[in-house]
Every structure is written in C-alpha cells, then in structure tokens.
Amino acid sequence: MKKRVAIVGTAGLPAAYGGFETLAQNLVANLRDLYDFTVYCKRTPRARRLSHYPGARLIYLPLHSNGWQSLPYDCLALLHAFATVDVVLYLGPVAGMILPLNGLFRKNVIVNFGGLNEWEREKLGALEKKYMFLSSRLCARFSKVNLADNWVLQKSIKQSFQAESLVIRYGGNHVGVPEDRADLEARYPFVRNPYFVSVARAQIDNNLHVLVDAFKKLPANRLVLISNWQVSQYGRLMYEKACEVPNIIPLDAIYDPVEINYIRSKAIAYIHSHSYCGTAPSLVEAICLGLPIISWDVPTNRETTRGNALFFDSAGSLQRIIHDLTPEELAGLKHSLRMLAKEEYTWDYVCKQYAELFDRS
C-alpha cells in the first residue's frame, strides 16, 4: 500500500496564487505514483468543486483559508488528517495548539514554517504577534520534522525555539517564458516599451509604499506593479497613490500563469520588495524566468539569490540603483543567476527531498 500523505494549510488545488499552493500542486504532480495524497481545500460553491484531481483526494471544508477563518480551517483539517493518514505535511504554523493532540494519534507531522519570523510581521497586531509566536513554538516542539526553505530561517528556528530543522527550498521551473501573442500584447500594450515589474501582496512588510515613492522620482522609468490591492486598507491606499504616478502601471492580481509570466518575462528586471519571507516563491520564479533581480536588502533575500542581485533598503537607494543601471550590469546579473536556477530551484530536486522525508517519517 502507498503511504497516505495529507497536505494542510493551503487554499486547495488547483493552485491559483501562492507559494504553498504551488508547492502542493507540484508535490502531487511529481509524487502521485508513490503516495496517496489528500489535500484540504477552502470553502467552494458546490458547482465549482472538482470531483477529481489527478493524484489527490480533495476535501472541501466549510471555511475560508484566510482571514480569521484560517485558524479553525487549519484546526479542522489537522484533526481530520490525524485520524485518516500516515504523514501530515502542515504548511504554515498557524494552528500550533492542535499539534499536541497528535499524541492521541501518533502520526508523523512535518511543519513547513514558510516565512521568516511570522510573529514579527508589521501587518499583525500585538495580540496576533504573541499568538503567532506561541503557535510557532508549539509547532516546533510537537512536529516530528521542522522545515525551513532558507538557511536564515533555519537559524531563526534554532535561536527562537531551540529546535532543529531541515532546509528544503522552493521550486521555480514551473514558470516559463510564453511565446509572443498578439492578444496579450493588445491586452497589455505597455510591454512594447521598457519597464520594471514587481509582484507582491498588499501588506505593509512588502513595501509597496517604497516602490511608489521611488518611482515618483524616476519619471523616465516605468514600473508595472501587480498586487491584490483590495484585500486591505493599506492596499487600497497604495493603489490610489500608484494611480497618481504617471509612470506606474498598477494591475490587479493576475492568476493566469501565461499572462503573469508574459508580463514578468518582458521586463527589464524584477524588483522584489518583500522583507519578511524565507525563500519567497515570487523571487524564485523571477530567477527561473531569467530576470535580473533588484531586491529588498534582508538576509533571506541575499541568501536566496546568493548575493547575485542589487539590493535596496529605501526609496532613495532604489532610485540610485535604477538611475545608475547599465546594460552590462543587467547582463551580468542574468548570467550569475542562470546556474543557480538550474541547480537549486527545480521541482524535481525539491520533490525528491520531500519524498525522502515522507519515507523516513
């Protein structure tokens, strides 16, 4: 019999947007011959539910996977998984208080911690930060294996919780450069002229305000800024500000992979503004698309790119980088990242590491 593996902590399959969803989709696609997968999915109208997904059993829960419902959503999924499978892969340490109950079931639980120090994020209130610290500590203590996707995150888990963890990175070779298409060029006519691109969720620690402030003072350079603007007050405010800057093109989140890859691949360079993450999926995807990287300067981003990027920490430093850019510098960045994409960030390599972990669990 195949070992039964549950994936908890995503919005479900098929992946639409998000690193954990893409991870789940690639694990199922690459390892379905070896394991029986169960993937828990967010509340979905019955007419839109999939009756079958290749390689996985989908279980739809009567809750949404984000906002305040994310906690009961994860709790319900974990309890069901403890009772029905052999290995539980929990993506994100939101429901740590449930993990001690696994003592009744004695199932093998693997926790992927995702972003760096979730309990410190600016988007969280004081009580939320305290809760996330406690939840992460419980996950670190009661899981069989802790996972980090970055050496900096591994060090943080050790320092914060005195817990060991393994590093397994994120794949990015699911992205590809689409062929030129007249319909996409007509839909996004800005691709005919040079531009920079950035993709980020609308939350304060992704520093959209820094990008807007920088490009206000770079009128000769264009920025295509893609975000889920309406998800927060911060996002709505940033959308209004971006619309006031003539050389910024704000776009709503794009979930079609061909469209988003088309827009990213045509850019001069990718600007990665995330300050709290491990190995950020959007950064890895940009690397695998062959884009030069201009990145927010934090240890995790330096580690992900192996330092092969240009780094900024303010609107002023970003302005200087873009103002001084040369074609030779951009070509050098692309060349230095090419081998990194092939060696570190392929799904074949990532899935083999997860398979070894499932077999040992």
Image (tube, rainbow, N blue to C red):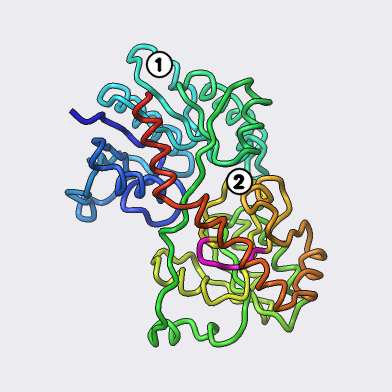
Residue picked out by circle 2:
277
Q: How far is the residue under mark 2 from the one under mark 1?
A: 29 Å
Q: Quadrant of the N terminus?
A: top left
Image quadrant in which you'd find residue 206: bottom right
Q: Is residue 27 left or right of residue 34?
A: right
- Which of disc 1 and disc 2 is earlier in sequence? 1
Q: Is residue 201 visible?
A: no
Few, some or many C-alpha atoms within 10 Å of disc 1 (few <14, some 14-19, many ≥20)?
few
Q: Is residue 77 visible?
A: yes
At 20% from the left and 55% from the top, the residue drawn is 47
Image quadrant in which you'd find residue 69: top left
Number of numbered discs visible in the structure rendering: 2
Q: Nearer the viewer, mark 2 or mark 1?
A: 2
Amino acid type of the residue tagged 1 in the rendering: Leu
Q: Is residue 280 magenta?
A: no
Q: Nearer the viewer, residue 263 or 288?
A: 288
- Furthest toward the top, the residue is 104
* Rendered location of residue 354, percent (x, y): 40, 37
Q: Name the element at disc 2.
A: loop
Q: Quadrant of the C terminus?
A: top left
Q: Is residue 346 above or below residue 209?
A: above
User: Which residues, given as a range, are shown in magenta?
Assistant: 288-293
Q: Is residue 291 above or below residue 172?
A: below
Q: Is residue 5 above or below residue 149?
A: above
Q: Is residue 264 left or right of residue 275?
A: left
* Rendered location of residue 148, percent (x, y): 55, 36
Residue picked out by circle 1:
101
